[in-house]
Amino acid sequence: MSKHSTICTVRHGQTDFNIQKRYAGSLDVQLNAVGIKDTVEAAKTLSLLGLNIRAIICSALHRSIQTAEILSNGLPIIQCSLANERNFGEMQGKTVDQVKLMNPPIEYLHAGNDTHSLNPPGGESFPELRHRAEKFYDFLSQHRGDFGILVVSHGVFLQQFHGVILNRTWEESLEFEVPNLTLTCFAFSDGALTGMTTHQLCAKSQNSW
């Protein structure tokens, strides 16, 4: 008999850093009031989708933990630092405009509708982030069963995690934005990917920064 499983991912709710276009990265930023309200709405939508989710795995950062707790509906939550956001090093806490003034200047790659920093001082490179996403996928593969797992994480990390599942390069993965509270579900049969669906859990337009 075939073994069917699902991995669903959702990016955390809104933070003040999202609105300010300020790099959060590995800083422990919390959801703002709008983020909490939107996540409560998202939890109601999630409950109506009929997904057979048995466990939630979130990053070890507070904005992800808060989102997971609101979405959980009593399900067990496991924190895993492998799912943390990319470490932006000295860029963290700075706005986009402040980063433009850094010396030496940051190198960027244009992909999709955004620019992506290639050399954040003291931070993670994209190949390093991709390797971490691969390790996280291996971790999930060891715990998969005939049920769904919900991963609550962060925009840049989820770009690379989705890329691992879809066999995209790290560069190709950057072309696909992950807005706040966007749910993406990957269906597997005997370990092979068989389908992908995407849902916006909150009716209000969400921040993709």
Image (cartoon, rainbow, N blue to C red):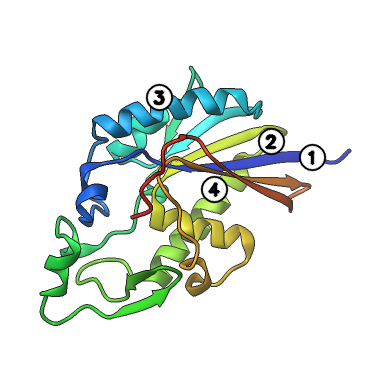
* Gap between marks 2 and 4 measured at Cα: 13 Å
**Horizontal and vertical percent position of residue 43:** 47, 25
Rendered-image quadrant of the C terminus = bottom left
* Residue type at the position of mark 1: Lys
**Would you say 100 lies left or right of 185 here?**
left
* Gap between marks 2 and 3 measured at Cα: 28 Å
Q: Nearer the viewer, residue 1 or 26?
A: 26
Q: What element carries label 2?
A: loop
Would you name the residue on which mark 4 appears? 139
* Residue type at the position of mark 3: Val
* Mark 3 Cα shell of 10 Å, populated few (<14), some (14-19), many (≥20): some
The quarter of the picture where residue 79 lies is top left
Label 1 or label 2, whichever comes before in sequence order? 1
Would you name the residue on which mark 3 appears? 40
* Gap between marks 4 and 1 measured at Cα: 18 Å
Residue 134, above or below 48: below
Label 2 or label 4, whichever comes before in sequence order? 4
* Disc 1 + disc 2, Cβ < 8 Å: yes
Would you name the residue on which mark 2 appears? 145
* Gap between marks 4 and 3 measured at Cα: 29 Å
Residue drawn where x is 60% and y is 23% of the image: 48
Would you name the residue on which mark 1 appears? 3
Label 3 or label 1, whichever comes before in sequence order? 1
* Disc 2 + disc 3, Cβ < 8 Å: no
* Mark 2 Cα shell of 10 Å, populated few (<14), some (14-19), many (≥20): some
Q: Can residue 178 be seen in this view?
A: yes
Residue drawn where x is 46% and y is 34% of the image: 202
Label 4 or label 1, whichever comes before in sequence order? 1
